[in-house]
Amino acid sequence: MIEALRGLGYTTATAIADIIDNSISAGASRVEVQFDWVAQNSSIRILDNGIGMSDIELDMAMRLGDRNPLEQRASHDLGRFGLGLKTASFSQCRRLTVASVKAGSLDCLRWDLDVLASSDDDGWHLMEGPAEGSEYQLDLLNNCSHGVLVIWEVLDRIVTQGFTEQDFLDHIDRIERHLAMVFHRFIGGLRPKLHIFINGQQVKPWDPFLADHPATWSSPVERIYAEGGALEVQCHVLPHKDRLSSDQHKSAEGPDGWTAQQGFYVYRNERMLVSGSWLGLGRGRSWTKEEAHRLARIRLDIPNTADAEWKIDIRKSSARPPVLVRERLTRLAEDTRARARRVFAHRGQPVRTGIGAPIIQAWHALTHRDGVRYRIDRDHPAVRVVLDDAGLLEPQVRAMLRVIEETIPVQRIWLDTTEAKETPLTGFSKEPPAEVVSVLNVVYTNMVSRKGLSPEQARQQLLTTEPFNNYPELVSGLPDTWPSK
Ligand SMILES: Nc1ncnc2c1ncn2[C@@H]1O[C@H](COP(=O)(O)OP(=O)(O)OP(=O)(O)O)[C@@H](O)[C@H]1O
Ligand SMILES: [Mg+2]
């Protein structure tokens, strides 16, 4: 049975997180994860300073399903099934030793799958004390007055053939990123409730929402009352890459990268279960993760009283919204996705009008029965002035516009966007201001000298005209008079 349970699908990171869950439930404020590379004899130890277990409690803890999943748990308890310690450990190792210090006594019990497999009878041989030659592993408990030490040895699922020390180090990096993410609300903030160390180095929190950044959009917090307890939801749209330094952009992307980290972040008692998923929501068919929505991240807090409704799994890595809240969550997500799409498409430029008037766009997307066509607006000031003054050239100019409209490189733009995971540069972004000013001057001069607009009227109109609406400072700085040529 244990051999079968090994295949539950933990990674080393999710398995360690499951062990740390127990430490948190036991009130620990400090967890140390120690990785020791000794090739085939490598080991992983996790030590906490929680309340520890008595000999009877330890005996129970080593058993599979010692607690009924239906029983009510304390509101800070991260456990549910009475399985995690064993299933997480055996997913990574063949020998699990747990030592506990409580009320001055040290107790230590051990499961060894190789011993179980080779025993003659069908007994479940739970052994006392560390394995021969592993006594030193308990050194970590030397100065400990209460707490638990979990030791994983014979790491057959990690140290597979060809696995090197460098692979082990890379593995540790991935684990650190995972712990930084799932426990960020415990290890972050002004007064962290928990400190996690990996080989002596403190793990720093990774907060998915960049809520302190001025360019992040955050919705008000919404409480949804549902069976099993109230949920809390807050939607965020993170700033576009152009508004972040490259370091900020790199660190905000998260362990799996921007596209993978979009969607809902589900927390159960502040512990992250799901790190970016659309939870099977969507209209008609479930939403998939797309580039355009990569800036959308939604915090969703659920209490542990709703475990059954949310179908929490043993690994604490999935959750499914109950039918009754799906509609509300879908609506909130739709709104957030639309906002995220706009930020993505405008490269983070807010769509500014200056005076609340609609923007005069250079291009329009016209939807026909057969599909969408893109048309240049003949009334855009830069276009209008040419048409009005074209005289005999007018038919040629109109023909030119039609040719441009019929040949916009739509496929090319689409491919470039998917490949670069960014929309191409438009609206003068990344161009020097001088470039904007020179085009702006031509249009402005025409509006005033040929169209008879007053300088003030011309500036007002330019504030709502693409692409100059993105440069209100330059528009406002246009002079009332200029030297005639
Ligand atoms: N670090 C620890 N400190 C104190 N008690 C612990 C610790 N780890 C485990 N325990 C005790 O052992 C029990 C079994 O742990 P286990 O992780 O197997 O199941 P669980 O946490 O109850 O539920 P789940 O399967 O959802 O994790 C816990 O309920 C707890 O009482
Ligand atoms: Mg547990």
Image: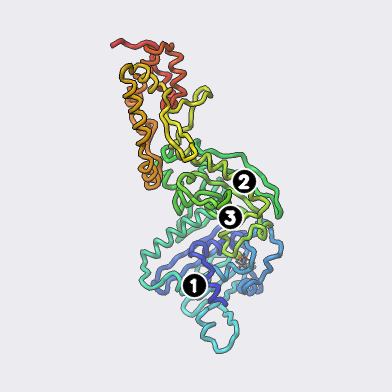
Amino acid carrying label 2: it is Val
User: Residue 183, how many percent across, how many down?
Assistant: 54, 54
For image coordinates 38% across by 23% down, the residue present is 383
Q: Quadrant of ligand 1?
A: bottom right
For image coordinates 54% across by 82% down, the residue present is 116
Q: Estimate how packed mark 2 is, as few (under 14), some (14 to 19) or many (20 or more) residues with alpha carbons within 10 Å.
A: many
First-in-chain label (2 vs 3): 2
- Label 3, on which residue? 271
- Label 1, on which residue? 93
User: Residue 83, how many percent across, how many down?
Assistant: 61, 69
For image coordinates 55% across by 55% down, the residue present is 274
Give the Cα separation between the discs numbered 1 and 2. Answer: 38 Å
Query: SS class of the residue under badge 2?
Result: strand
Q: Which mark is residue 233?
A: 2
Query: SS class of the residue under badge 3?
Result: strand
Amino acid carrying label 1: it is Cys
Residue depth check, mark 2 versus mark 3: number of the one nearer the observer:
2
Amino acid carrying label 3: it is Arg
Residue depth check, mark 1 versus mark 2: number of the one nearer the observer:
2
294 and 124: which is toward the camera: 294
